[in-house]
Image: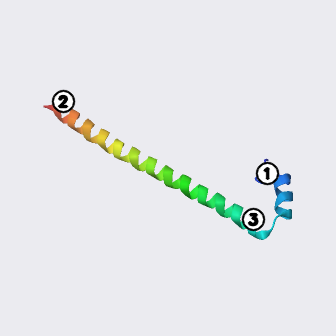
Amino acid sequence: MSKIITDQQIDIANQAEPTEILAAVHKRLVMAEKGFGALKGIVQDFSVELEMIKERLDKLEQEESK
């Protein structure tokens, strides 16, 4: 099973100041939030496109049934 934190990272964390560790964690959290925000935008765009495709299919099916 792989480790989430390597031995080298543990050594670095043990030698770091608590404020450095907090700053690093904060930086990772901010990056993750930005990534999730971007992902949410992409999902919303796909949702709109999917609805447009559904509407177009409904129109085509209605025209076909006439």
Residue that mark 1 sits on: 3
Q: Position of residue 24 (x, y in %)?
A: 71, 61
- Tag 1: amino acid: Lys
Density class for disc 1 (Cα within 10 Å; few <14, some 14-19, many ≥20) is few
Sooner in the amino-acid sequence: mark 1 or mark 2: 1
Residue that mark 2 sits on: 64
Identify the residue at image location x=60%, y=60%.
30
Q: Quadrant of residue 10?
A: bottom right
Considering the numbered disc 2 on the image, is that residue within a helix, a strand or a loop?
A: helix
- Residue 49 sits above or below residue 18 on the image: above
Considering the numbered disc 1 on the image, is that residue within a helix, a strand or a loop?
A: loop
Colouring convention used in this rendered image of the protein: rainbow
Q: Position of residue 7 (x, y in %)?
A: 85, 53
Viewer-proximal residue among 7 and 14: 14
Residue that mark 3 sits on: 21
Q: CA distance from mark 3 to mark 2?
A: 64 Å
Sooner in the amino-acid sequence: mark 3 or mark 2: 3
